[in-house]
Amino acid sequence: MRAGRFFVYGAHDQGKVPDGVIPIRIEAGVAFGTGHHETTALCLSVLSELAHRPFKNVLDLGSGTGLLAIGAAKLWKKPLLASDIDPVAVEVTVENARVNGAGPLVRAVTADGLVHPVLAASAPYDLVIANILAGPLTRLAPQIVGALKPGGMLVLSGLLHNQEATVLSFYHRLRFLGRRREGPWSALVLEKPKR
């Protein structure tokens, strides 16, 4: 699957990686995020569009397989954090980061929200990627907004078109920059005002 600058593939596609892409190898398994879901592809496309920005402190909230964290690590070549509520997903993230040569850059922790000591100590973030569901996006909104630095960017996905207005209402303190849609799914891009 190609999304923006990225090409996501499994071991069976090893010889089919085209030139000029950022390859990410992810096997289908027990954690969400093989790259074939519309929300993951939408997030990868948004990351590609943001590649020119010099992000230094990135969080992938709800990492699943770690695909978005790996993509961000390959784009910005900076250490970043990935978190998931599921400890199995965290193990999968660590292994996938290693397989993709991003192991030294991706630190993964098991956490529900951003109150985990590692996540809290690493804030504020200049980019947060949260490809989870609309319910957790609304529940975690105060924590996410609080952990974002002024001028920081937020990519929200895992929501349907008809959930956009509800989710955005929880992020009213942020500036809406745009949306991407594929099928019934959406990704929202927001920015925290500098003052």
Image (cartoon, rainbow, N blue to C red):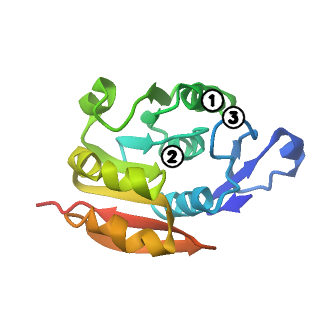
Q: Which mark is residue 72?
A: 2
Secondary-structure class at tag 3: loop
Nearer mark to the viewer, of 2 and 1: 1
Name the quadrant of the N terminus: bottom right
User: Counting residues from the N terminus, which is met first, the one under dot 2 or under dot 1?
Assistant: 2
Query: Which amino acid type is marked by label 2?
Result: Ala
Residue 98 x/y as whole percent: 63, 27
Residue occupying the point 47% across, 75% down: 162
Decide if residue 54 is in sight here: no
Can you identify the residue that label 3 sits on? Answer: 30
Pick the front one: 136 or 81: 136
Q: Is the residue marked by circle 1 packed among few (<14), some (14-19), or many (20+) residues within 10 Å? A: many
- Label 3 vs label 1: CA separation? 8 Å
User: As shown in the figure, which amino acid type bears the numbered disc 3?
Assistant: Val
Instruction: State which quadrant residue 114 falls in.
Output: top left
Residue 27 place in picture, x, y as percent: 75, 39
Residue position marked by numbered label 1 in the rendering: 92
The answer to whether 191 appears left or right of 34 in the picture is left
Q: Amino acid at mark 1?
A: Val
Disc 3 to disc 2, how far (Cα)?
A: 22 Å
Decide if residue 180 is in sight here: yes
- Mark closest to the chain's N terminus, 3 or 2: 3
Give the farthest residue toward the front: 135
* Label 3 crowd bin: few (<14), some (14–19), many (20+), radius 10 Å: few
- The circle drawn on residue 75 is none
Marks 3 and 1, the one that precedes in the sequence: 3
Q: Position of residue 127 (x, y in %)?
A: 36, 50
